[in-house]
Amino acid sequence: MDFQFGEKEEQFRLEIREFVKENLPKGFIGNMFEEEHTDENWAFAMSIAQKLAKKKWLTISWPKEYGGMGASTWQKVVFAQEAGYWGIPGIGMGVSGTAWVGPSLMLFGTKEQQEKYIPLIAAGDPDGVWCTGYSEPDSGSDLASLQTTAKRVGDNYIINGQKVWTSCAHKARYIWLACRTQQNTEKKHQGLSLIIVDMKSKGLTLNPLKNFMGGHVFNELFFDDVKVPVENLVGVENNGWSQLMTALSFERGLALSAGGACVRILDELVEYAKETDRIDDPFVRQSLADLAIDIETLQILSFESAWKEDQKKIVIYEPSRDKALCDQLLEKVSRVGSDILGVYSQMDIMNKDPRWSKLKGSVEHVYYYCIGLAIAAGTTDTQRNIIANFGLQLPRSY
């Protein structure tokens, strides 16, 4: 099988690299979520997002009629690889808007919702930044057990409940909220709905959840009689589970970008090992070789998912397979990188002093976040269950 990209795709790759050269500082290594830590990083990410929007790259996979580039499958693959490799900021910023809220609105949203929200996302507008309200204190991987309620009263929904681990909520204008609109259903998957909520709504309280490094990415949200107009319902009331699964498949299809980031870290580790003579250690060489093989495996599997999409084949378990492997790979990258960097790997990723923060903190960053990323969008075990049920056709145990 030929894994070479065509002339059109390679020309596009060069165009992306020219954009990186013109707009990012020399040697820049972007870190996922870092843009949300400080106002300075956020402002820089927003400025890049708007430049990407002008090129239609921010919404590269969207159809042209919705403000996207209408790119081919393989152009999207090239962009995901390059964006991950160079750490282009602004793409991860409020990624839910471009990655799954926008595409879901195209499928399930009303014409009014599409006309109101989609142009803001496509333009990289501050009002086009979204967060996602799925997880709750007692509902993580078992998402169907969520308890946040939306009770219809006249022309409004009255929302009560709590969400947690909501990334980007402190920057977002809107939240893509999963809630329960029907009680006492036969099955817990029934009676769920998706509702758009303005983050400026009265009765919505946000508390930051800072990590032990002082970084602020996650938040907890409290809904106390938050009033939302019924026209903010997405799709059909009580049919939210089906829509949620579609949105989650979009979210899980990000392995190509993560794979690109892993390739960059691998390249940086190889250079570091050569410069410090660590490459003379057989263990280091073998560890880097094993890591290179795993990264290539992830990319090939991601190519298969992309190929099936390009062939209009139904993709069901593949995004979960790719994400499960990606979760393991990120952990391995952090472990191998930490072994090679030694004591430098213990430095705070917020430390900008080049004497101590090696590889611009990229390894430390993956180390601190890989466990959380393995939980986001469904734990690795949840992904394996999906692979078992839909990929291997194994029976459920319940």
Image (cartoon, helix red, strand yellow):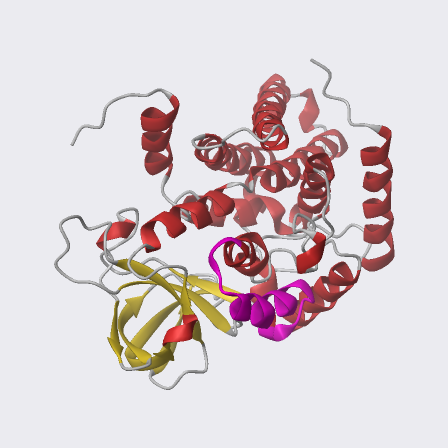
Quadrant for residue 296, please give it: top right
What percent of the width, then of the height, locates residue 245?
39, 46
Q: Residue at x 72, y 43 (%)?
A: 79
Can you name the residue that lies furthest to the front here? 111
* 372 and 166: which is toward the camera: 166
* 194 and 92: which is toward the camera: 194
Compared to residue 197, the image places residue 194 above or below, namely: above
Compared to residue 224, the image places residue 264 above or below, namely: above
Q: Give the overall secondary structure of the magenta segment.
A: helix
| 119 inside magenta stretch | yes
- The quarter of the picture where the N terminus appears is top right
Which range is magenta?
107-127
What percent of the width, then of the height, locates residue 67?
70, 60
| 177 inside magenta stretch | no
Q: Residue at x 51, y 53 (%)?
A: 107
- The quarter of the picture where the C terminus appears is top left
Answer whether residue 124 is visible to the viewer in this image.
yes
What percent of the width, then of the height, locates residue 102?
56, 58
* 106 and 396: which is toward the camera: 106
